[in-house]
Amino acid sequence: MEEAKQIVTDIQKGNVSPIYFLMGEEAYYIDKISDFIEESILDEAEKGFNQMVLYGRDVSIDDIVSNAKRYPMMAERQVVIVKEAQDLSRTIEKLVDYVNNPQPTTVLVLNYKYKKLDKRKGLYKALKKNSVVFESKKLYENQVADWIRRVLSGQNYSISPKAAQMLVEFLGNDLGKIDNELSKLKIILPKGTQITPEHIEENIGISKDFNNFELRKAVGERDTLKAFRIVKYFADNPKDNPMVVTVSLLFNFFSQLLHVHGLNDKSPRSVASAIKVNPYFVNEYLTAARNYPMKKVSAIVTSLRSFDVKSKGVGANAVPQGDLLKELLVQIFN
């Protein structure tokens, strides 16, 4: 995030590179940087003759180089943006000659999504010398809630820990999808608002009471009535609550509980640091650790491995998802 901000800041200050090679698994920052360059390097009058967008599936490296070597018309620079450049992965190394001698009046942007260059080869080494190379890495799911908070803070919004966790649980670590949902909320809610679970439920459609986050909490507290009520909701709404996601979340939860049991220092700060969770949620883990001794946690983890296989359709094709989840809860609570 900071590296992406620095690229934008440098461009705003007039420090513009002749080449931006944007690569990596996380498309969100690649799109953000590319869109910023597309919108801000040239003014509207200059864009008509001096800005073009190409697509990797439609062009060759020779086409890109030919366009990049053109001179701008009545402007200081031209901008050439190659979207979906990963479609040129088999021939991308041919770009090395241009990278070694780029056209100084061209800003060439290559969006190389979901992949990255071989850092041992000539193209990457040439790019490191003569251009800006940005690698956009996927965030781990336990980092996404903090990312949501930081993004919203910069836009004069805040979000409760539970609301952030609901988004992560529903959308995973797809920053583009999360950003789209946050954009919808920002249209509705005035600046300075704290986004709550109620806002998420009303405007995005994620239930604040019947979700994996609440199921995890109910299981940790051994609240059997609430847990079975949530599982019934999941059974009635299987498309929105796939069993494979539920089992994965519970597996991670009990695996973290094993870690908690093994800690000498069980203070909230120590636990939060050790299992890498927001301090807001630490009490859930401490409560669950009191309710489930280490031997029981180990047995539950073993059961969850078996149910993980079943949730993917192996050996349980004819068993409804709801019945499997109820069976899982029985094994956890007994």
Image: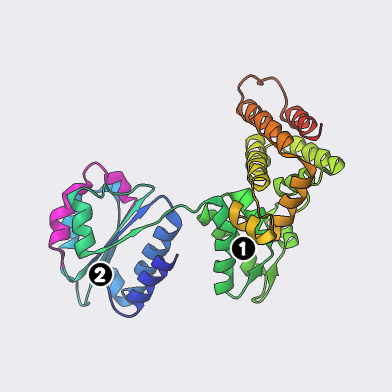
Residue furthest front in the image: 264
Seen in the picture, residue 250 relative to 284 is either above or below; the reply is above
* Image quadrant in which you'd find residue 283: bottom right
Residue 239 % position (x, y): 67, 38
The stretch in magenta equals: 82-103
Q: Given the image, on which type of amino acid does mark 1 rest? A: Lys
Residue marked by disc 2 = 17
The secondary element bearing badge 2 is classed as: loop
At mark 1, the secondary structure is helix
x 37%, y 63%: residue: 34
Residue 95 colored in magenta in the image: yes
The residue under the point 62% across, 24% down is 313
Q: Looking at this rendering, what residue extends furthest in the bottom direction?
A: 13
What residue is disc 1 on?
184
Residue at 66%, 48% (x, y): give it.
260
- Side of 100 relative to 200 (left or right): left
User: Which percent across, then down, holds residue 231?
Assistant: 77, 38
Residue 120 visible in the displayed image? yes
Front in this rendered view, residue 8 or 47? 8
User: Of the residues shown, which amino acid type is indicated by label 2?
Assistant: Ser
Question: Is residue 322 one of those drawn in magenta?
Answer: no
